């Protein structure tokens, strides 16, 4: 497998993870819903109560520092824990945890490439036994440089040196699918590539090789000399896209956490159709 | 554990693995969609209409037309051999077993130990979902398997009828009233054995051997010479 990503260390593969299953400082997080976890999971993995890490009092936005610290503590994640996240959803939910951890100042979370799908294909160990962990102590240190608010996005739209990368479906981009928002459409000057384009289109759903991702991003005008703001409906697909860009070596990447659930329900934001 | 008395209603993992390719076999995974998508037995289908209650009358089983449509969606026709499983001690799989029996389909069995034992034994699993060919299911109601409220009230005092209540202790005692029940308690004259008592104590949750089941039931007065109404 080609591992010439700018930050190849952000991914692990099944062979590595299987060899490290017993590491006392390693916390594996199954980022899919609890009923999937209960059916079967990687031995020693834990599952979060809320795999989107949204603030229950303000559901469009990421948890507040204290809420996120409590969620991490419950998973047994402390400041010095090694975290590997996986899912069976094309690294969508694992990418969300990676971004939330990054936002709260924890920069060494990694993602299992191909996730559960490839783990199962490769016949690696699995269990139904739920992992008991002792509480961690996680210190949230918000890093606003990876976060985009609506105000921030409005201030950088159509600005040279900043690209808004919209990773929603064609229907959402064209405005034919409103997702229940008051308004539909896209942001002026944004470019579009659905998040699934970052994956090899087969059952394992690994990330595409670096060379393929690079030519795809180049074709969109998404280059590492610029700041990239990723957007979707709820900051989950956009987190997977932010993960992909960081993996490729991009330095300045922000996730619009509120995304269209925020943008398209406000009246003060520009939309094209 | 399967022994001769149970043969015919229950299959084990070894049998099922040997029959995975049978054209006439439909395996049904009776857990949640999320569980099914994570992994399942190869060829297993997922029933979107579980537990087969009538949407217009959710206390009761589906109408014949509704149930026939639910079975057609699973590719279950009149000649299909059905094996149902779950990871909850057979509770969901048994629901499908009973509904099929009620609608006259005899060829249905349960995987003993269900998903839990299948996984533990290292048998094949997949995330791939089968393409299900349309089928025709003809419902033929067998009213001898159904008890209505009126039926229970009329028969509960008869010496040849036993009402077997399989709810939890708290439901039996009336200290817990689940759902929208307006009253708690138990039916006069009924006997109580929680459904989980039919299972082995270990994590595999297989059925108890028939001798143990027979003793437990006999001690509660539940014997094959009686008519049993389960509630």
Image: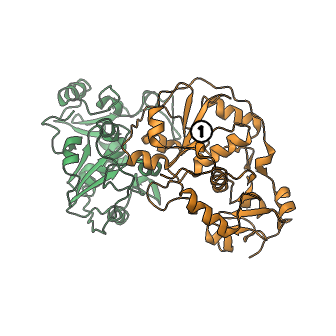
Query: From what the image shows, is residue B217 above or below residue A220?
Result: above
Q: In the picture, which quadrant includes the C terminus of chain A?
A: bottom right
In the foreground, B76 or A153: A153
- Indicate the position of residue B163 as horizontal and vertical percent values: 31, 36
Q: Is residue A194 left or right of residue A142?
A: left
In the foreground, A248 or A26: A248
Q: Is residue B118 visible?
A: yes
Residue drawn at x 36%, y 50% as measured from the top left = B126
Q: How did the renderer colour the structure?
A: by chain
Chain on which label 1 sits = A
Image chain in orange:
A
Badge 1 is on which residue?
A: A49
Q: Which color was chain B given? A: green
For residue B188, which quarter of the picture?
A: top left
- Indicate the position of residue B41 as horizontal and vertical percent values: 32, 49
- Indicate the position of residue B24 as horizontal and vertical percent values: 20, 60
For residue A162, which quarter of the picture?
A: bottom right
Residue drawn at x 47%, y 60% as measured from the top left = B56
Residue drawn at x 77%, y 49% as measured from the top left = A147
Query: From what the image shows, is residue B185 above or below residue B181?
Result: above
Residue drawn at x 17%, y 35% as measured from the top left = B224
Which residue is farthest left?
A: B4
In the foreground, B111 or B210: B111
């Amino acid at each position: 497998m080609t591992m010439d990503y700018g930050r190849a260390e952000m991914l692990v593969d099944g062979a590595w993870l299987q060899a490290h299953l017993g590491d006392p400082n390693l916390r594996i997080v199954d980022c899919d819903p609890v009923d999937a976890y209960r059916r079967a999971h990687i031995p020693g993995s834990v599952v979060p109560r809320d795999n989107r890490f949204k603030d229950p009092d303000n559901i469009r936005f990421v948890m507040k520092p204290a809420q996120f610290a409590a969620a991490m503590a419950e998973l047994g994640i402390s400041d010095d824990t090694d975290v590997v996240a996986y899912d069976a959803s094309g690294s969508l939910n694992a990418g969300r945890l990676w971004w939330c951890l990054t936002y709260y100042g924890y920069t060494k979370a990694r993602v299992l490439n191909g996730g559960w799908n490839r783990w199962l294909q490769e016949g690696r160990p699995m269990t139904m036994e739920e992992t008991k962990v002792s509480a961690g102590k996680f210190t949230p240190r918000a890093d606003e440089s990876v976060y985009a608010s609506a105000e921030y996005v409005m201030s950088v739209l159509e600005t040279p040196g900043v690209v808004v990368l919209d990773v929603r479906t064609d229907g959402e981009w064209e405005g034919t699918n409103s997702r229940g928002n008051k308004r539909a459409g896209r942001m002026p000057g944004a470019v579009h590539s659905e998040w699934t384009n970052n994956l090899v289109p087969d059952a394992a759903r690994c990330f595409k090789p670096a060379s393929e991702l690079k030519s795809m991003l180049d074709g969109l005008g998404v280059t590492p000399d610029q700041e990239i703001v990723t957007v979707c409906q709820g900051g989950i697909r956009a987190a997977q896209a932010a993960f992909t860009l960081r993996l490729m070596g991009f330095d300045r990447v922000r996730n619009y956490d509120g995304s269209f659930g925020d943008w398209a329900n406000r009246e003060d934001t520009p939309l094209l159709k | 554990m399967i022994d001769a008395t149970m043969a015919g209603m229950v299959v084990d993992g070894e049998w099922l693995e040997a029959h995975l390719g049978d054209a006439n076999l439909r395996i049904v995974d009776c857990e949640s969609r999320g569980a099914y998508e994570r992994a399942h037995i190869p060829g297993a289908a997922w029933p979107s209409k579980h537990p087969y209650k009538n949407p217009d009358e959710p206390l009761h089983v589906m109408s014949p037309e509704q149930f026939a449509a639910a079975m057609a969606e699973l590719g279950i026709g009149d000649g299909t051999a059905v094996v149902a499983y779950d990871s909850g001690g057979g509770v969901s799989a048994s629901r499908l077993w009973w509904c099929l029996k009620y609608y006259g389909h005899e060829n249905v069995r349960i995987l003993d130990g269900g998903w839990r034992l299948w996984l533990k034994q290292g048998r094949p699993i997949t995330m791939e979902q089968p393409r299900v060919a349309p089928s025709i299911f003809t419902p033929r109601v067998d009213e001898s398997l159904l008890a209505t409220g009126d039926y229970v009230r009329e028969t509960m005092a008869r010496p040849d009828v036993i009402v077997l209540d399989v709810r939890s202790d708290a439901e039996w005692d009336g200290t817990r009233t689940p759902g929208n029940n307006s009253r708690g308690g138990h039916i006069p004259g009924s006997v109580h054995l929680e459904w989980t008592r039919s299972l082995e104590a270990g994590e595999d949750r297989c059925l108890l051997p028939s001798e143990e089941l027979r003793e437990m039931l006999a001690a509660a007065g539940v014997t094959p010479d009686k008519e049993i109404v389960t509630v």
